[in-house]
Image: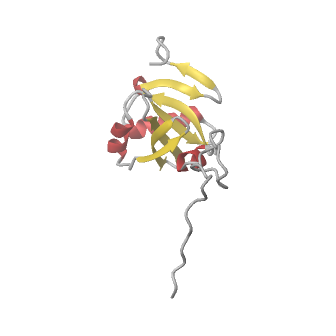
Amino acid sequence: MIPIVVPGPEPGWQPAASPPYYTGENPPSQVSLWEAAGGSFRMIAGLKPPIDAFAARLRLKVERSWEDLGEVDAAVFTVERLRFTLSLMTYGQAETWVWLHRAHEDADAALAVLLRALGLGQDAVAFTGGPDTGFHYLDASGPS
């Protein structure tokens, strides 16, 4: 069998970056797994503890991906038939963000289910809401 050799990139091709950063003649623009999956979820809260503590508690695997501003650590999982994602941007984000699949409507009830599974109370919540609904910080000091 004769091996098929894939040619290297054309001389003018830049890396296949995501729009709006795409600048080259390279045919594709690339998105991360995080960006591809993220559209199915909406942010519902920020939790104070780090993502690694949640992963240890629930025995989740944290995966590293990337987005416009840098790398993101995320874990996607289901609790009581509710689909969640926990994420932490590695460029200095303080809270672990909680995302709920858009198929689930009651964010407050879903957050209560997640907190119960984590063995935590409302004191672990830094804010509720997100870009779609507005942020409601539970501490008067606002974002950390």
Could you tell me residue 105's position as x and y percent? 64, 39
92 or 20, nearer to the observer: 20
In the displayed structure, 65 sits above or below 108; it is below
Could you tell me residue 80's position as x and y percent? 49, 48
Residue 51 sits in quarter: top left
Q: Quadrant of the C terminus?
A: top left
Colour mapping used in the image: secondary structure
In the picture as drawn, the residue positioned furthest to the top comes out as: 140
Q: Is residue 35 left or right of residue 86?
A: right
Identify the residue shown where x is 56% and y is 20%: 136
Q: Is residue 119 left or right of residue 9?
A: left
Q: Is residue 101 left or right of residue 98?
A: right
The total number of labels drawn is 0
Could you tell me residue 131's position as x and y percent? 62, 28
Could you tell me residue 39's position as x and y percent? 63, 44
Identify the residue shown where x is 44% and y is 31%: 91
In the picture as drawn, the residue positioned furthest to the bottom comes out as: 1
Identify the residue shown where x is 52% and y is 34%: 69
Identify the residue shown where x is 54% and y is 26%: 128
